[in-house]
Image: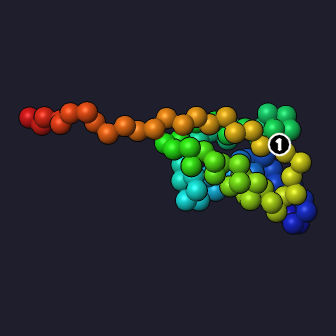
Amino acid sequence: MSATEPLPEAYLLRRVHEALGTDPRVGEFGLVVELEGSDLVVRGCLGTAQRKAGVVPVVVEALAEQASELVVRDETEVTPCEPPDHEEELA
């Protein structure tokens, strides 16, 4: 496979998924990455707005070698984790 030949869809999605999980700007393997026509869509929940802000740059960098015509759609949501409001009692 040459550098200019596009990756098969499964490899492309795996590359993006791995980048989202391993890059510290996002650091989330639980996101869903799908192709919808010419859009690459990322869905799921992230703990901070800072991590959400990292989604598109990480995806664009992961696709850079592909010179891709894909449009990246970030449909992730921020759902912050709140600390517990009481102590948990263990039996």
Q: Is residue 48 above or below residue 86?
A: below
Residue displayed at 87% across by 66% down:
3
Residue lying farthest to the left in this orientation: 91
In the displayed structure image, the side of residue 58 where residue 65 appears, left or right: right
Q: Tell me where residue 47 appears, x and y as whole percent.
A: 49, 42
Q: How many numbered discs, if any?
A: 1
The spot of residue 65 in percent (x, y) is 82, 63
Query: Where residue 70 sits in the image (x, y, percent)?
Result: 84, 45
Position of 31 with respect to 40 (left or right) is left
| Colour logic | rainbow
Write the residue at 58% across / 34% down: 77
Res 22 visible: no
**Residue at (71% x, 54% y) in the render:** 57
- Kind of residue at badge 1: Val
**Residue farthest to the bottom?**
3
Q: Nearer the viewer, residue 40 or 15?
A: 40
In this picture, residue 58 sits left or right of residue 22: right
Evaluate whether residue 38 shows in this view. Answer: yes
- The quarter in which the N terminus is drawn is bottom right
Figure quadrant of the C terminus = top left
Residue on which the image places disc 1: 71
Q: Position of residue 59 (x, y in %)?
A: 71, 52
**Label 1: element kind:** strand
Image point (41%, 39%), residue name: 81
Relative height, residue 19 to residue 52 (above, below): below
At label 1, counting other C-alpha atoms closer than 10 Å, the crowd grade (few under 14, some 14-19, many 20 or more) is some
